Amino acid sequence: MKAGLNLNQVNVQTLTMTPQLQQAIRLLQLSTIDLQHEIQENLDKNPFLEMEENDSGSSNVTSLDEIREKEYRLENGNDDITPFNNDTTVSLDNAPYVDGGGDNDYTPLKGEEGGDNSISREDGSTMTDSGSEVDFWQESYSAGVSSRRTHNSDGDELEDYQGATSYGLAEHLSWQLNLTPMSDSDHLIAEAILDGINESGYLTESLDDIISAVRPEFPDITMGDVERVLNIVQHFDPVGIASRSLQESLLIQLSQFDDDDNVRLARVIVSDYLEILGKKDFRTLAKNLEIKERNSHLLKDAIDIITRLEPRPGNCIPQEKSEYVIPDVSVHKKDGVWVAELNPNAIPKIKLNETYCQLCSNVRNPQENQYIRNHMQEAHSFIQSVNKRNETLYRVASCIVLHQQDFFERGEQFMKPLVLNDIAMETGLHESTISRVTTEKYIHTPRGTFELKYFFSSHVSSTDSSDEVSSTAIRAKIKKLISEENQKKPLSDSQLAKILENEGIQVARRTIAKYRESLNIPPSSQRKVM
């Protein structure tokens, strides 16, 4: 065989990720806040970019095609075009930006608020006490003994801590400690106690460890001194803080009540029968307390007092500020149909710097000319990427809204099953693009503010019709059935499955249990009340 060099022509298909494409993909998956930061960085380093000033009196609307035409003409040296006038706003596929006012006035809304139809997100964290006690408290408590409100010097009531404060539990307790007259040794003991309090408000350090921490400065400290200071701290607001167990915390909170028969009975229950109460074994509890059936109201009143206590005192003070989101899209009704509209306050408006663009043609220095060309090209590319992101967001949001008309009209129970592939097929986009554009993007609806991903859910077959049911709709049905159940005879998972089967929805008992747990709803044995 003869060896040699050959020159052959072969056709090979390769996918090249251009810098512009990489930038467009990266901007697509950014949240509104991250996009604003990205835009600010580009404004700082590129003199050809500037933020478009808001003009509330402007009514001119420029379509996306007109913007692209202006960019094309500018790139080809037509200087008679003034790109992106200050009085021009961007419209995506006949979806004009609407100036703030009326139904389209946007304010920062807290995530997922929707009245009766909003998804409640209860705290699912657990304590280190016995499981039965924790499960009982996850359902029962509604308000703590300690006040969640504060007053100003004039006695006027201020907002709830969650809305009025920006500091956490440690700062709140330190503030009270600094206002409490104490000796230097007691103050140091109190500081050591505060350092050992966890987020739930319980003291995790032993008293021996606290003594060891203080004795280097005050060798004469005794256990009695530590217990005395601990008692003072436990009566800080919220009352019951720095307790070493659930039982101790509840007893401290009960000590703030007026002494009557119901409170005394509540103390006995907490002291001796808290585990039985946690299991909701009311019959055994009444037997141990020797309460006859005709006096069952006494037991009920005592339990009502206990359930109003705060099992985790630290939860009375928020650990950090509440987070708010600005919706990227809004939904409103137009001609009897729910339609999507981009939020003008959430979408940044940028444009080319008019002054720099007009000076381009007068530059003769090759280095300056190259500098201008590079930065103008980057500015054009960035503006196009932002416009493409907004256009894609609008297309996907509009398609989702079109699918979920029944949800906006009638609520969660009528949510349609929807997967990424459904939207991808209709919009002609890839599933990965749909995933990126629905992540950390929020939509404001009459039923609350939701992440766009919320509207995607799996399919569950229906036995009575060819229609499929969304798992979100099933969760809503379960939540509604449990809210309307007889609390003395709560519905079991098997009964819930039977009720749904009668409605034509075939769901296994284990699936019901999984959906119920995802809603932070305890099982029927723990939902039972007297």
Image (cartoon, rainbow, N blue to C red):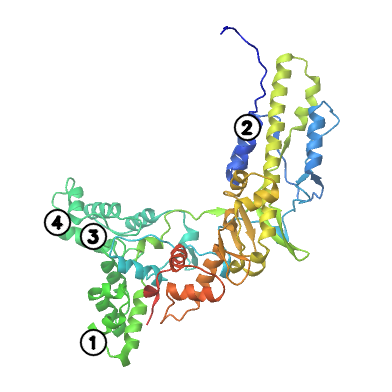
Q: Residue furthest front?
A: 1
221 up-or-down from 50: above or below: below
- Residue extending farthest right: 80
- Residue lying at 80% horizontally and 20% vertically, measured from the top left: 362
Which labelled disc corresponds to residue 44? 2
Specify the quadrant that holds the N terminus: top right
Which badge, 2 or 1, comes first in the chain's sequence? 2
In the rendered image, which residue does mark 3 sit on? 229
The first of marks 1 and 4 along the sequence is: 4
Q: Residue 261's quadrant in the figure? A: bottom left
- Within 10 Å of the Cα at label 2, are there few (<14), some (14-19), or many (20+) other Cα atoms? few
Vertical comparison of 424 with 480: above or below = above
Residue at numbered disc 1: 290
**In the rendered image, is residue 37 in sight?**
yes
Q: Amino acid at mark 4?
A: Thr
Circles 1, 4 touching at the beta carbon (< 8 Å): no
Q: Tell me where residue 174 appears, x and y as whole percent.
A: 34, 54
Q: Which residue is mark 4?
A: 222
Q: Does the image show residue 237?
A: no
Left or right relative to 181: residue 397: right
Q: Position of residue 210 (x, y in %)?
A: 21, 52
Provide the secondary structure element on which disc 4 rests: loop
Residue lying at 72% horizontally and 32% vertically, measured from the top left: 380
Q: Of circles 2 and 1, which is in front? A: 1
